Image: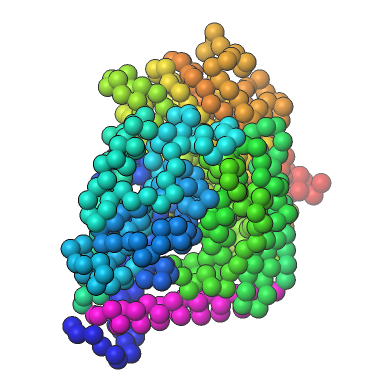
Amino acid sequence: MSESTLEPDAATVEVVRNYLTSAATEMQRTLIRTAYNTIIYEILDFGISLYDRDRNLIADSPGLALFLGANDYALDKLVEHLGEENMEPGDVIIMNYPYWSSTHTLDVGVFAPIFREGEDADAEENELIGYAATRAHWLDLGAKDAGYVLDSTDVHQEGVIFPGTKVYKRGEPDEEILDLIRFNSRIPEKVLGDLNAQIAAIRTGKRRLRELHGKYGSETVDRCIERIHDHGERTAREAVRELPDGTWSAVDYADGTTGELIRIEVEVTIDGEEVRFDFSNSDDEVEGPLNLPRGMTETVSKLCFKSITTPEEVSNAGQYAPMSIHAPEGNLFHATYPAPTFTIWTAIVSIDVVYKALAKAMPDRIPASSGGDLNDIMLYGVDPDTGRQFVEANNDAVGWGATDTHDGANAVMHISETMVQNIPVEVFENKAPIEFDELSLRRDSGGAGEHRGGLGLRRDFRIAHPVGALSIIQKTRKPGWGIDGGKPGAKNGVVLDLVDDADADDDRVQVLVDNTDIYDDDQLWVGMFRGEFVPGDVISNRTGGGGGYGNPLERDPEAVREDVIDGYVSRETAREVYGVAITEDGDLDREETESLRAD
């Protein structure tokens, strides 16, 4: 089809929009099919984006919701660093410099410019039509510790850094860069395999965008994209106008790693068609690796903004035009060199803080707090069968908060990772020397309310062979929150049950967050930890529950009875918190219930 100067009709715009979305989805499928590690092909820890020539988002396919927008910031920094004039057909560029790439050093971004005529055309005459981006978690890239870095004090302890480095030049691999990656990884075959999977996904996106421009002509495609962005912005602004105007703030705390809680405060302002997120009252940069790059703060804000404006629509740059953020340099939410940023779980905690502020403005549209964290147990060491080093991680689900119309969902991934999955038990036991003793819903973990918060879960890892293990978790000391009289759910936590010849002070386990003081049992409760574990040790991951909505004494007694029968709520909690008497046979004692609620 020749170039057209006609304004594209609505049908053509819609065809182009769906083609772009399909291209991003095909990139995702390519990545999943070709990746080497479970963290990509099972957990879906990645983010995929397509951009127009002006670096405006035109389609994405996130696995990890927290990557929503992370590639946007990184691509701008990459072009600023390299210069668009220095990009040629066939170039593939990697970036993991956290202050530019938006996240920690193992979330490696792979980017490529897209030229209309492909890889073989003369760069001087070839037309730049867009960019493709993939971001995925690599399991090791020269950091001081295997698996995850929990106690770094400097970014240079967190791995080899690429500020925007061509790993392919004009379609040819740079073997020196590949060697640099290979010799700085404990598991080079898997890391290079995942790099190649990302490049395969990039090539899929490039091919599809070139086909689109070839079919309709660049002028028509550009006008369609402009219409798509205009519609996205108009729809978002209309949604904002329906929200109440005002300013609301909320505060919560992450655990930290030094014994001091980390203050997270956000102020949300809605003014007409504009929404502003202000993080300036949060703590300044902290000593440990819990500081957030500016790009991560933007993606937290974009996730929350999209969920209250255009949650049903695929993403494009126009939808975020009404949104702005403020986070001064040196703040927890705008880390500066050389502040460590590896353990970015403060971003996960901050999402619920944003919603806590929004709940003050629109309690009928915002649920109570979720479990508030992403509870990750990671194992690493030498595989006893192959003799090779391995790293395996698993994200466990939390309870979601109740709303004014229904109970919260049980054991669902935190909203930061709503597209993410956990690894099936059979796969995990095959990949690491462990056995699972228990995987169950955690009774009484959902916050009480007229509508009950969702339950967290319990997963018990029994160590079958000497292995290293750690937890990545940052909300274990402070509870979540309910709405309109609802109670918070149970806190997140990990219980370490070590074999008889070990104790809590054993040098083989470094406890960064000790929670034994907030529980009245004899178990060793911890938050973030790293250690060496031996056969017979059990790591019990206990995830938090969602907050309740409304007065628990107003919950339908029959609903409480069903919760008891299902094992969600104990008979004791039914009586003491909900004022509902359930007999040992599971029947509702209506007379005693009336008496309990009358008191």
Residue extending farthest to the bottom is: 6
- Position of residue 595 measured from the top left corner of the image (x, y, whole percent): 77, 46
Residue at 35% from the left image edge and 25% from the top image edge = 389
Residue in front for this viewpoint, 255 or 131: 131
Observer able to see residue 478 = no
Position of the N terminus, as image quadrant, is bottom left
Q: Residue furthest right?
A: 599
- The answer to which of 358 and 217 lies nearer the viewer is 217
Res. 254 in view:
yes
Q: Locate residue 273 relative to residue 60 in the image: left or right.
A: right
Pinpoint residue 111: horizontal percent, then vertical percent.
35, 56
Determine whether, in the image, residue 584 is placed left or right of residue 124: right
Could you tell whether 131 is left or right of 491 in the image? Answer: left
Q: Quadrant of residue 327?
A: bottom right
Q: Residue at x 41, y 62 (%)?
A: 83
Residue under the image location 21 percent in, 75 percent down: 214
Q: Nearer the viewer, residue 93 or 436?
A: 93
Whether 239 is among the magenta residues is yes
Q: Position of residue 59 (x, y in %)?
A: 38, 66
Quadrant of the rendered image containing residue 226 = bottom left
* Segment colored magenta: 216-245
Vertically, is 63 above or below 19? above
How far from the left and from the top, in percent, is residue 452? 61, 50
